[in-house]
Image (spheres, grey):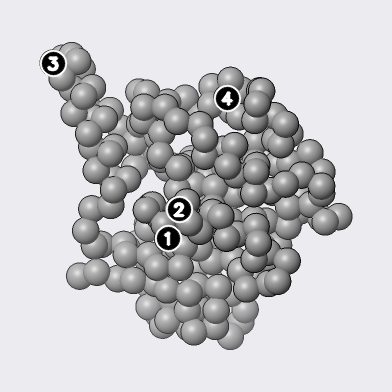
Amino acid sequence: MAVTFSDLHTESGLKYLDEFLAGKSYISGDQISRDDIKVYGAVLEKPSDEFPNASKWYESVSSQLASSFPGKAVGVRIGGKGAATAAPVEAAPAKEAAAGDDDDDLDLFGDETEEDKKAAEEREKAKKGSSKKKESGKSSVLLDVKPWDDETDMVELEKAVRSIEMPGLFWGASKLVAVGYGIKKLQIMLTIVDDLVSVDDLIEERLTVEPCNEYIQSCDIVAFNKI
């Protein structure tokens, strides 16, 4: 049965999520899963007490992510998608991510996505290369990409990120997160085929060197989950 969550940045979207989570600990069972990470990424901030089930679920997912990544967090808030200042920046990512994940329309149990199909093709190629080699696994990664300052063009920054292509790397949904002092960072999902892509190498050898370092100061891994 397909379950779709839409407009999670609105009260109506959060209300539907809250009703869905009534009597549930997580989206798809009693343990945190990829489904929870996907929906968590689409919720702009912790739901208010008006949505107790969604608020409790959000805190649970946040705490588990925090325990997996013990680095010190600076604390951020995510601006509403409808804000006038955010509209120009988010227009380009919306077009580029149209064929991939959709923050506002998440079909958790529906048809296989293009992203999944491409990953499956990569696994088949790896199997053909060596009959003894086991099928490659995949990982879902949430990445923070930080600009140099508040004057950095965030549209061009995201274009630079998405311009990086390599076998086993699939960029997903993204959004801007306010850091402070007028500075925003890019938070972007990506899926990797483990045997083909190293996230550390991606950051050190592609994202933080020329030409991307014209816009990118640094990158941090926020969440890393095996699929």
- Going from N to C along the chain, the mark reached first, 1 or 4, is 1
Residue indicated by mark 3: 131
Mark 1 neighbour density, 10 Å: few (under 14) some (14–19) many (20 or more) = some
Q: Secondary structure beneath disc 2?
A: loop
Residue 130 seen in the current view = yes
Residue 73 at x, y percent in the picture: 72, 47
The C terminus: image quadrant: top left
- Going from N to C along the chain, the mark reached first, 1 or 3, is 1
Q: CA distance from mark 1 to mark 4?
A: 26 Å
Residue indicated by mark 4: 206
Q: CA distance from mark 1 to mark 3?
A: 36 Å
Horizontal side of 138 relative to 126 (left or right) equals right
Q: Secondary structure beneath disc 4?
A: helix
Pair 1/3: label in front = 1
Horizontal side of 170 relative to 209 (left or right) equals left
Q: CA distance from mark 4 to mark 2?
A: 21 Å
Mark 4 is on which residue type? Answer: Arg
Residue at 49% x, 47% y: name it: 189
Q: Nearest the camera: 141 or 90?
A: 90
Q: Secondary structure beneath disc 3?
A: loop
Mark 4 neighbour density, 10 Å: few (under 14) some (14–19) many (20 or more) = some
Mark 2 neighbour density, 10 Å: few (under 14) some (14–19) many (20 or more) = some
Residue at 19% x, 15% y: name it: 129
Residue at 34% x, 36% y: name it: 138
Mark 2 is on which residue type? Answer: Ala
Residue indicated by mark 1: 102
Q: CA distance from mark 3 to mark 2?
A: 35 Å
Residue indicated by mark 2: 97
- Going from N to C along the chain, the mark reached first, 3 or 4, is 3
Which corner quadrant of the image does residue 51 belong to?
bottom right
